Image (cartoon, rainbow, N blue to C red):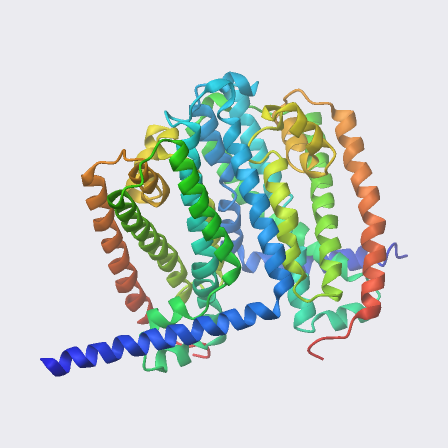
């Protein structure tokens, strides 16, 4: 019994060390391209200003967006910015590369490594250029939420970060499911672009959409849980059952991605065969 | 007889090879077509919004505007900077530069071939749109269609020249495609893809009209949708941008080629 725990700890340590190596390597690469970092930063800032401008068009003459006030809608925008930063930092560089492994046959080497292949392809690298976007998202969330009259008790912040974790897991799983299909359709990496386009719907509170889309964005493609639900939590408007539903969805999505990866791998025939 | 390195045979060869290449990847192109759904997402928001009054376009006008914006975007998408960067990095550019044909023509051909391949998918999406939203159905007149096509083609030309300008910078910095982001962001917000420009506050509108972006989506989309638009000044602005950008691209390219070091060779 004791031996099993020790072994598990050893395994965890090994995975953490690997991850640290990967990511410090990524930071090293970043320093090679400082100019790009600056460009990315400006583009991100301009993009945020543009999004807030478009959002403001819905609020002329004291109107609201699906019953959400300007400040509350900004909180949603903040969560979108934060998750977009997560996508750019973590998901896109890693999961976007899967298609290259498949096309060039280098997935063989990944599969031969004595480490979980889903782990390897998911944390192989990091694009630190997205980190300022994450920071800006957090600032926007806190600022807009305080303007909207939210109270930052420990409980609220704790539940919000839990829900943020749920959003990240759902987002990761969606990306991973799409990315794993490249095992069959080598050239369809742009399926992730379709996903990105659809996820852009998360910039706005889900009640602003027509009823049919609301259902789709809650159940089929859980965009509501990515931005609207965390925003409701920090604004103190959410019901307990949505939180439980969120966790349930996140767990289901994660295990689906895991099952699907193993299923997809059983079809992998290497590049030259 | 060759004009700018082009003769009928060259055009035919370029286009037919690029078209065959694009047909191979039609699934990919279908997905690219689908990834342009953003105007539809914005349409559902705007049409649901109680203050549609502030927008000046209402009901079917709004639907037509966003469908037109979608279609214009479909046929003016440009990715030359990415292709070019890859070709320069992998050394594929070297043989192209040796040919008695400006390498940019090759990219023009591949974009046009892609548009032809994309046509059925865009058409299908438009049909589905009308099935879901029959009230918005309209058939533009022949002249309207011709003008809209011309405006879209000019929009593609401006987009292509803008990106070629950045692509030429690849001769100096091999990661120049990062600069494309600086172009894409104002394009996204000022072109009219997310909201018709008529909804913009007048100061922002004035500023936007000084940039080429409104002539990339908003102007051709309004022509196609049959919404009120100043056709003459729109076309003049488009031509103005083309005549400014074309020499700039050619000069920058010429300067860049001198610096070319044939990476990967």
In the image, taking residue A42 as reference, residue A271 lies left or right, namely left
User: Looking at the picture, how far across and down is residue B144, in whole percent?
Assistant: 68, 26
Q: Position of residue A244 (x, y in %)?
A: 19, 45
Relative to the observer, which residue lies in front, A60 or B211?
A60
Quick check: B82 above or below A77? below
Viewer-proximal residue among B193 and A85: A85
Image quadrant in which the N terminus of chain A is located: bottom left
Q: Is residue A123 above or below residue B80?
A: below
Point out residue B172 in the picture as x, y percentages from the top left corner.
Answer: 75, 66
Q: Position of residue B49 (x, y in %)?
A: 44, 23
Q: Is residue B24 above or below residue B237?
A: below
Residue A191 shows in this picture: no
Between A133 and B30, the one nearer to me in the picture: A133
- Point out the image quarter for the C terminus of chain A: bottom left
Q: Residue at x 23, y 43 (%)?
A: A243
User: Position of A65 compared to B13: left or right?
Assistant: left
Is residue B242 found left or right of A205 in the rendered image? Answer: right
- In the orientation shown, which residue stands out farthest toward the right? B1
């Amino acid at each position: 019994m004791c031996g099993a725990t020790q072994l598990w700890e050893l395994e965890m340590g090994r995975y953490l060390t690997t991850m640290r190596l990967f990511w410090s390597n990524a930071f090293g690469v970043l320093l090679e391209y400082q100019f790009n970092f600056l460009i990315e930063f400006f583009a991100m800032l301009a993009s945020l200003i543009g999004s807030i401008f478009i959002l403001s068009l819905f609020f002329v003459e004291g109107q609201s967006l699906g019953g959400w006030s300007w400040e509350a809608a900004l909180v949603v925008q903040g969560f979108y910015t934060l998750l977009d930063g997560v996508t750019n930092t973590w998901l896109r560089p890693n999961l976007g590369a899967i298609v290259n492994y498949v096309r060039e046959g280098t997935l063989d080497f990944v599969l031969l490594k004595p480490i979980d292949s889903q782990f390897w392809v998911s944390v192989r690298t990091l694009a630190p250029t997205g980190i300022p976007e994450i920071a800006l998202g957090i600032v926007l969330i806190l600022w807009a939420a305080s303007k909207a009259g939210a109270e930052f008790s420990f409980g609220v912040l704790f539940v919000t970060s839990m829900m943020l974790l749920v959003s990240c897991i759902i987002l990761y799983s969606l990306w991973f499911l799409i990315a794993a299909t490249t095992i069959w359709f080598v050239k369809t990496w742009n399926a992730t672009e379709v996903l990105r386009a659809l996820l852009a719907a998360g910039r706005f509170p889900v009640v602003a959409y027509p009823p049919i889309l609301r259902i789709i964005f809650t159940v089929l493609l859980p965009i509501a849980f990515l931005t609207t639900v965390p925003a409701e939590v920090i604004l103190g408007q959410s019901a307990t059952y949505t939180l439980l539903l969120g966790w349930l969805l996140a767990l289901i999505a994660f295990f689906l991605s895991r099952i699907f990866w193993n299923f997809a791998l059983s079809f992998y025939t290497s590049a030259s065969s | 007889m060759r004009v700018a390195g082009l003769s009928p045979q060259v055009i035919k060869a370029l286009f037919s090879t690029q078209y065959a290449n694009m047909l191979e990847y039609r699934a990919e192109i279908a997905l690219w077509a689908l990834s342009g759904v953003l105007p539809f997402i914005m349409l559902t928001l705007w049409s649901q919004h109680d203050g549609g009054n502030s927008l000046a376009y209402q009901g079917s006008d709004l639907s037509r505007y966003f469908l037109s914006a979608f279609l214009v975007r479909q046929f003016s998408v440009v990715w030359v900077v990415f292709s070019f960067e890859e070709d320069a990095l992998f050394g594929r550019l070297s043989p192209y530069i040796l040919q008695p044909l400006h390498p940019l023509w090759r990219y023009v051909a591949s974009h046009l071939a892609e548009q032809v391949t994309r046509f059925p998918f865009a058409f299908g999406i438009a049909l589905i749109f009308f099935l879901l939203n029959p009230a918005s159905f309209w058939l533009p007149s022949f002249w309207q269609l011709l003008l809209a096509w011309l405006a879209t083609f000019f929009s593609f030309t401006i987009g292509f020249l803008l990106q070629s300008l950045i692509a030429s910078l690849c001769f100096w910095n091999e990661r120049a495609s990062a600069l494309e982001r600086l172009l894409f962001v104002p394009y996204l917000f000022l072109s009219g893809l997310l909201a018709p420009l008529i909804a913009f506050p007048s100061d922002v509108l004035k500023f936007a009209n000084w940039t080429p972006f409104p002539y990339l989506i908003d102007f051709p989309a309004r022509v196609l949708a049959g919404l009120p638009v100043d056709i003459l000044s729109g076309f003049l602005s488009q031509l103005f941008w083309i005549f400014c950008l074309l020499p700039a691209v050619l000069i920058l390219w010429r300067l860049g080629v001198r610096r070319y070091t044939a990476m990967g060779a």
